[in-house]
Amino acid sequence: FTDSQLENFLTVITDWDVDNAHSHLEDGMKYSNGRLIMPQDGEYYVYAQLYFRSGGRVGIRKNHREVITMLQHSYNVAEGPHYAGGAFYFEANDTIELLTATPVTLFMATAHSYFGAFLIE
């Protein structure tokens, strides 16, 4: 597949409840259609936890380029949470998003699945 052909199979996860009491958009951070938008230049710690109910693969993308892969290795593995995180440099208005290129079932309750970023420098 070419990158443009692969793009047709990708689905951005948009089932985040930003109105929930546990959701916080602070210091200029914005959310739109499954994407967090960085308010200023700097190094951010990006994190995500997803509770997989099935096998599958979820990627964390920075500006439409995958930088972290979260993988439930087998469709025979018991369900459970997977956490990933890392530090990345962003410019103002850069975005992060979680997406899947394979069928995956996630438990999206607030305490089980979340993602975010905070400025560290």
Image: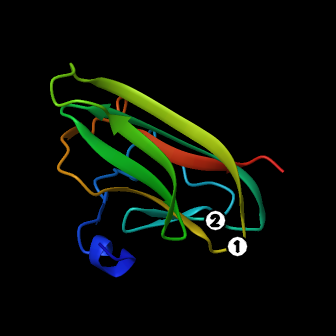
Q: Amino acid at mark 1?
A: Ala
Residue bearing mark 1: 92
Instruction: Please report the residue visible at 68 percent of the width from the left and 67 percent of the height from the top.
Output: 39
Which residue sits furthest front?
Answer: 1
Residue bearing mark 2: 38
How many residues crowd mark 2 within 10 Å: few (<14), some (14–19), many (20+)?
A: many
Question: Judging from the image, what secondary structure is the residue with disc 2 in?
Answer: loop
Residue 86 in view of the camera: yes
Residue 10, x across and y down, in percent: 29, 65
Q: Nearer the viewer, residue 52 or 14?
A: 52
Residue 28, x across and y down, in percent: 66, 64
Question: Looking at the picture, does residue 29 appear above or below residue 107?
Answer: below
Which residue sits furthest right?
Answer: 121
Label 2, label 1: how far apart the Cα atoms are: 5 Å
Whichever of callouts 2 and 1 sits on the residue coming sooner in the sequence is 2
Residue 47, x across and y down, in percent: 55, 41
Total residue callouts: 2
How many residues crowd mark 1 within 10 Å: few (<14), some (14–19), many (20+)?
A: few
Color style of the picture: rainbow
Q: Amino acid at mark 2?
A: Met
Q: Are marks 2 and 1 in contact (CB under 8 Å)?
A: yes
Which residue sits furthest bottom?
Answer: 4
Q: Which quadrant of the view contains residue 45?
A: top right
Question: Looking at the picture, does residue 80 appear above or below residue 84?
Answer: above
Instruction: Please report the residue visible at 61 percent of the width from the left and 61 percent of the height from the top.
Output: 29
Instruction: Please report the residue visible at 21 percent of the width from the left and 21 percent of the height from the top.
Output: 77
